Image (cartoon, coloured by chain):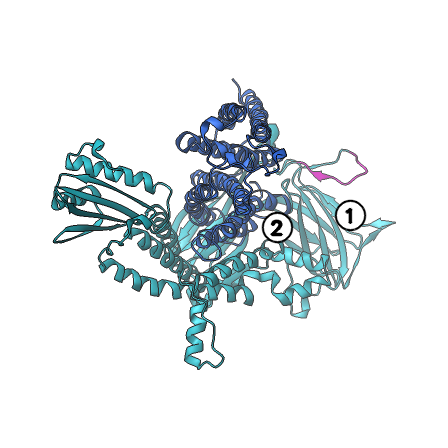
Amino acid sequence: MSPRNRRDQPASELRPLEFGRWAWRQLTSMRTALLLLLLLAVAAVPGSFIPQRGVDARAVQAYYLDHPKLAPILEDLGAFSVFSSVWFSAIYLLLMISLVGCILPRTKVYAQALRARPPKAPRNFGRLPASDRFETDASVAEVLAAGRRVLGRARVDVVEDADGGELRAEKGYLREFGNLVFHICIVVALVGVALGALLGYRGNVIVVEGDGFSNTLSQYDEFSAGAMFDPETDLEPWSLDLGDVLTRFYVEGTNRGAPKLFRATGGYTEGGRDRGDFSIEVNHPLSVGSEDVFLVGQGYAPVLRVTDSAGDVVFDGAVPFLPTDSTYTSTGVVQVPDSDGTQLGFQGFFLPTAYSPDPSKPSVSVFPGALNPRIGMNLWTGDLGLDEGISKSVYSLDTTKMTQVKDGDGNFRIDIGPGESQALPGGGKIEFVELKQFARFQIGHTPVPWVPLSGVGLGILGLTLSLLVRPRRTWIRARRDGSRTVVEVAALDRVPRDDLPADIDDLLSRLRADLGDAPEKELS
Amino acid sequence: MTTDQMAQLSNYLTGSAFAVLWIAFFCHVAEWISARREAPVAVAAGQGPVVTADHDADDRPETPDRLVGIAVSLTVLGTLLLIGGSVTRGLATQRAPYGNMYEFGVTGTAIALTVYLFMVWRSRIQWMGGVVLAVCLGILTMSVSSYTPAGPLVPALNTFWKYIHVTSIMVAAAMFMVGAAASVLYLVKQRAEDRGAVGPVLARFPAAARIDQVAFRVNAIGFPMWTFGALISGPIWAHLAWGRYWGWDPKEVWALITWIVYAGYLHARVTAGWKGRRAAYLALVGFATFIVSYYIVNLFISGQHSYA
């Protein structure tokens, strides 16, 4: 950022303009930029340790339950959404301003430097970090011409007067160019990210095998869009029918149970027209129009049927159970709003491969594939809280106004496999009709992804230039002394390097070779 | 040879590399101890243990130099064994050997040691050996502590972006490893130079300014690679696998923090009042944040990078 480091102190009385100028200079100074950078790094830390609402909303809910006193304080501090909090944004914005405030003047300075000629040689070469001299029979003009050849692609000026001449050379202009490109590209990348967030959206939906999804807001389970995205008009008209979810797991060796393949297949339409079949895998999304459909999860959705005491079906449908571990031990909920005049709530587990080494203990899932699927649930009756107008999650049961159904001394427990049914204490039954799978899709539209991508990409090229190119000024001064010419050579690096003396030696020997001089004539 | 036998061989090779590198490290420790013993200026002389940094080669005690030679030879052997361990691991799993934390650590350390040995060959930086080995052994210990039996990968990792993303991150990390070792040395040496008390051990190291330059060079190579790994190939892959290119996953957050701190380091080196020592501290903080993103995040925070 700005190399300027003047510690301008505000005078006791400053007019607004002067104060503004002073504040601007402070903000765009390298020191401030550095501190802001480090502050940004520190400010990001809590975002990795405290659950973030934008990353995992359920983890935030769990945090509230575990730390009921601390959570509201953290909430006020914005700790559950660090990256959109006021203080994080403030640092970020100040850094952006500082960045722009450094790019603009530096671009101007660089434009001037591009037109400028190499500077005059200093009077005393001995004060420079590396210098040397020799004598030769060649004339001043010959020496300077040889110097021009030896210095190659550097920008060179030759000035001659009565008793000699000097050659001024400068190279390494690309360093500052790369530096500016890098910083400008960071701004471009950040603007691209911001545009993508403003104009884009992202949504999540669980679809069970045999069901469909059409791209309208009401079909999404979770949906978040940028301020400039209107879900009513901007969602593209397409739909899909999920035919099959294919999952494969390793069955042998140390990786038994590790996932091998996840694939969702089916057919889709776009704008009412049939587009044929699709196959979505992890790392292989489906593109529909400007939107992408990603497979981000899958699990089991047993089809359950609940019948009341009169034999009427009060619930019949696939219930997605959300996986909680690598063996797909999954949790799920069935809510029945009306069964014999009361409301029923089932809550419990699905185990794809249930196994119980000891019959007195509850089963556990030992393999993620559905080899021995079982459902174990408890039952509540009372008020599901559906009428309060607050949207409730379909994956959790609010039991505050419900009572758990007992069976003798213990709680009533349902334990059924596919095709089995179990009678309920109040009459009626629950039936495990068949096992289906569900796919969780993430659907999103990120406009102009190439802006941040090319921003960072070009930025790296600029960065590499700025780190590799080494600017150097070289001077060769030749002066006639009797019948001989005394040649002095010196160089100065804008970025100090330890190979300068060796380079001067090298330059000297190439210069003398070009002049046809033998090195033993060297003085000193 | 079956893949199981190959996996076994890989474990033997990595295990022996670990042992050989420990011995090499002890050779460097012995080098420093003997340098102190054979110092031409005795402590008892009452002038303090001060030795000039650039004394003649004839004055140099022989034993420490011999020990350095042994240490470098052992490091070459250990590095070859480690590369063998990494390659056989790849053959056993039929894929590139960096699909989890263990493999990342082993292969990354092998790269870091290769970088170091290359620099020994080109710029004779064996004076850095002891500290480089200490850093590498630390990383190896972390990776061995998260040992995973040889096996295939979860579907999310099954893409060629893995090779690009992980390779660039790993090479960058290897650079940061060597850079951190140099920064530690720089801080120690600079402190001694400032006090005018460069002892016989520190006299074996080059001038602080030169050490600082070595640290800068490797970090300056590492930084663009880290940028590419964390901010280009990572987001592209994240977009394909998870449907978003940046999601503030804990590992992403820490990779960004590492990037910011190293960016701060590069700026600090050209900022008055931050040059030198403060910049070197920043490089070490940067390396510490890398350790957090490599190791601590996986142990203590759950996120989408939980496999590696």
Which residue is label 2 attached to?
A: A320
Tag 1 secondary structure? strand
Q: Is residue B98 visible?
A: no
Residue depicted at x 29% and y 60% = A110
Q: Position of residue B74 (x, y in %)?
A: 52, 24
| Kind of residue indicated by mark 1 | Arg
- When asked about the image quadrant of residue A134, the answer is top left
Residue behind mark 1: A413
Range covered by the magenta-colored residues: A358-366
Tell me if residue A117 comes above or below residue B283 in the rendering: below
Quarter containing the C terminus of chain A:
top left
Residue at mark 2: chain: A
Chain A: what color? cyan
Measuring 31% from the left and 49% from the top, which residue is drawn there?
Answer: A492
According to the rendering, which colour does chain B have? blue
Residue A418: percent from left, percent from top: 66, 41
Gap in Å between the C-alphas at discs 2 and 1? 20 Å
